[in-house]
Image: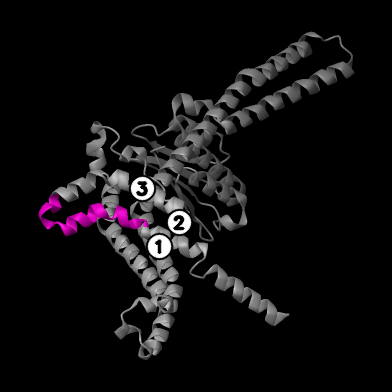
């Protein structure tokens, strides 16, 4: 069973790669189809006196030849060569200067001038190889047409050699055609399609713009939620607390149990207002939008449970997204200092240098801060990274701890 299975697989492989298989004819058709498309460039080499005119005509025909080559790859090789953007094609006279300046134009021109003639020569060689192979393999079928001096019995041994060589050539020609097709496809992908490096640069720029749009949209959504909570739920809670306070002050003849319930409800309402205030500030503090980063950081420093020395020097305000990231970075950093550092003092320095906002948070605590052991510093790193910023944490054992954040102000 093993031997018969191997024999069947070998037979199928030979049938699939034989010179009469579809694979062989497709490769042959692809290479031969390069012949007519190589004629415009071949004319420049065949007629040197008219080379300048031929090269100019070849440049004008570049878009049409590129279209035909892409069709050849798609229909005969089942390979799609991506097209360049429409802005790089001379669709109208006003677009001709931009088309001539585009590097894709000259890459395509180089393909039609250099690669296409070579592909045409390869196609001619493939046709010649098929013809010689068939002629050699079938020499016994047509040798009777040769003159007597070439067809006598003495030539029989030579006919055997020619037949073997013809058969070998028939077997080798499909592989030669496939190799030429692969080389042609490699050159076409590099020269006829868009520049891969520039496409990657464009995609990176698009992704950066998309991410900036997402960040701006998220910031706008946080502001909307903050406004809704501040103008809606918070105001209702304030009104409820005021009514409960009035009820407690005016309804003095109520039973003690009712007064206790009113007192409890009043206390719960005030605590809910405080929690909601903290939530609103955590979403997007109104002072950040109204008065900027300086006032917002001053509010954080004033609420901190330890003395904070704050210095803010901003020649002009950064973008709203960067302001929000800077605010939350300082807020989280001070919270980490208060919770873990056992510090007695802290210093926050925020300065803008050209298009870079640099924030430094320094405390005199015990040090030893390690981003791998907690989620607070990891969250800082992720928040800073969302705007392509950098964060450096220097926290030796015994302190001090210095957190340096740099945020680009282009967002």
Identify whether 151 is placed above or below 309. below
Asked whether 18 falls inside the magenta stretch, the response is: no
Residue 263 lies, in percent from the top left, at 79, 20
Disc ID at residue 181: 1
Residue most extreme to the left = 49
Disc ID at residue 77: 2
Q: Quadrant of residue 4?
A: bottom right
Asked whether 40 falls inside the magenta stretch, the response is: yes
Residue 298 lies, in percent from the top left, at 48, 33
Q: Secondary structure at mark 1?
A: helix
Give the camera-side residue of 292 and 58. 58
Give the camera-side residue of 130 and 228. 130
Q: Secondary structure at mark 2?
A: loop
Identify whether 38 is placed above or below 219. below
CA–CA distance in space, label 1 to label 2? 8 Å
Disc ID at residue 68: 3
Is disc 1 in contact with disc 2, using a CB cutoff of under 8 Å? yes
User: Which sits earlier in the primary sequence, circle 3 or circle 1?
Assistant: 3
User: Which sits earlier in the primary sequence, circle 2 or circle 3?
Assistant: 3
Disc ID at residue 358: none
Is disc 3 in contact with disc 1, using a CB cutoff of under 8 Å? no
Residue 83 lies, in percent from the top left, at 39, 45
The magenta region covers 33-52
Give the camera-side residue of 349 and 309. 349
């Amino acid at each position: 069973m093993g031997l018969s299975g191997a024999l069947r697989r070998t037979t199928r492989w030979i049938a699939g790669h034989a010179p009469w298989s579809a694979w062989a004819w497709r490769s042959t058709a692809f290479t031969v189809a390069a012949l007519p498309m190589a004629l415009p460039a071949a004319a420049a080499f065949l007629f040197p006196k008219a080379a300048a005119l031929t090269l100019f005509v070849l440049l004008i025909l570049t878009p049409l030849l590129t279209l035909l080559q892409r069709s050849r790859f798609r229909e005969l090789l089942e390979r799609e060569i991506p097209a360049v953007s429409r802005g790089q094609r001379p669709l109208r006279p006003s677009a001709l200067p931009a088309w001539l300046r585009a590097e894709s134009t000259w890459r395509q021109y180089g393909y039609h001038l250099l690669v296409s003639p070579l592909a045409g020569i390869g196609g001619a060689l493939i046709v010649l190889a098929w013809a010689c192979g068939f002629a050699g393999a079938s020499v016994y079928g047509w040798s009777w047409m040769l003159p007597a001096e070439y067809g006598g019995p003495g030539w029989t041994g030579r006919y055997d050699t020619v037949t073997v060589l013809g058969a070998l050539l028939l077997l080798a020609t499909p592989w030669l055609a496939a190799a030429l097709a692969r080389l042609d496809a490699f050159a076409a992908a590099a020269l006829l399609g868009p520049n891969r490096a520039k496409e990657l640069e464009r995609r990176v720029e698009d992704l950066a713009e998309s991410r900036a749009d997402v960040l701006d949209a998220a910031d706008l959504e946080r502001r909307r939620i903050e406004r809704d909570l501040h103008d809606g739920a918070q105001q209702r809670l304030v009104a409820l607390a005021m009514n409960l306070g009035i009820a407690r002050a005016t309804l003095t003849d109520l039973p003690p149990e009712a007064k206790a319930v009113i007192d409890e409800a009043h206390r719960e309402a005030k605590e809910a207002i405080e929690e909601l205030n903290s939530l609103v500030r955590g979403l997007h503090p109104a002072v950040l939008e109204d008065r900027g980063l300086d006032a917002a950081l001053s509010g954080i420093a004033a609420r901190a449970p330890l003395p904070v020395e704050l210095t803010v020097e901003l020649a002009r305000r950064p973008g709203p997204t960067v302001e929000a990231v800077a605010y939350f970075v300082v807020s989280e950093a001070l919270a980490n200092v208060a919770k873990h550092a056992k510090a007695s003092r802290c210093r926050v320095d925020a300065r803008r240098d050209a298009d870079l906002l640099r924030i430094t948070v320094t405390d005199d605590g015990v040090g030893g801060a390690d981003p791998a052991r907690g989620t607070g510093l990891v969250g800082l790193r992720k928040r800073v990274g969302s705007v392509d910023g950098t964060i450096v944490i220097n926290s030796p054992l015994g302190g001090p701890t210095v957190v340096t954040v740099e945020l680009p102000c282009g967002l």
